[in-house]
Image (cartoon, helix red, strand yellow):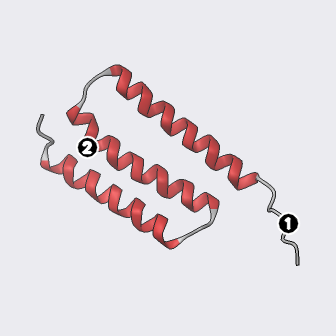
Amino acid sequence: GVVPAPAAWGGALLISLGVAHLGMTARPMRVALGLLTLLAGFETVYAFLEGSILVTALLAGINLGLALVGAYFIHAPEPEVET
């Protein structure tokens, strides 16, 4: 299938912004948002290539799992550093 130009540009923009966000931070919430942004860009492009409901459900499950892992790391206690 062919991806329409606006969807390709939007997906590429989201992917590049997600990668840039991941490259600039190490804080758990911002890393989770960067990964979600990158995944949203991938899903935007991939939605035009594959129309299967099962693939859409798998990507939604990945989104939910990533959000849950991000929420866990936001509230996880900081490891103690021995000096």
Instruction: Name the residue rendered at 26%, 56% in the picture.
Output: 12
Residue 28 % position (x, y): 63, 59
Q: CA distance from mark 2 to mark 1?
A: 42 Å
Query: Which residue extends farthest right?
Result: 83
Query: Which residue extends farthest top?
Result: 53
Determine whether 73 is above or below 52 in the image: below
Residue 62 % position (x, y): 49, 36
Q: Which residue matches tag 2?
A: 45
Q: Secondary structure at mark 2?
A: helix
Q: Is residue 74 left or right of residue 31?
A: right
Q: Earlier in the sequence, mark 2 or mark 1?
A: 2
Between residue 79 and residue 20, name the one nearer to us: 79
Nearest to viewer (mark 2 / mark 1): 1
Determine whether 55 is above or below 71 in the image: above
Q: Which residue matches tag 1?
A: 80
Quarter of the image that includes the C terminus: bottom right
Instruction: Name the residue rendered at 48%, 58% in the picture.
Output: 34
Q: Amino acid at mark 2?
A: Val
Q: Quadrant of residue 19?
A: bottom left
The answer to the question of whether label 2 and label 1 lie on touching residues, with beta carbons closer than 8 A, is: no
Determine whether 83 is above or below 52 in the image: below
Q: Is residue 1 left or right of residue 74?
A: left
Q: Amino acid at mark 1?
A: Glu
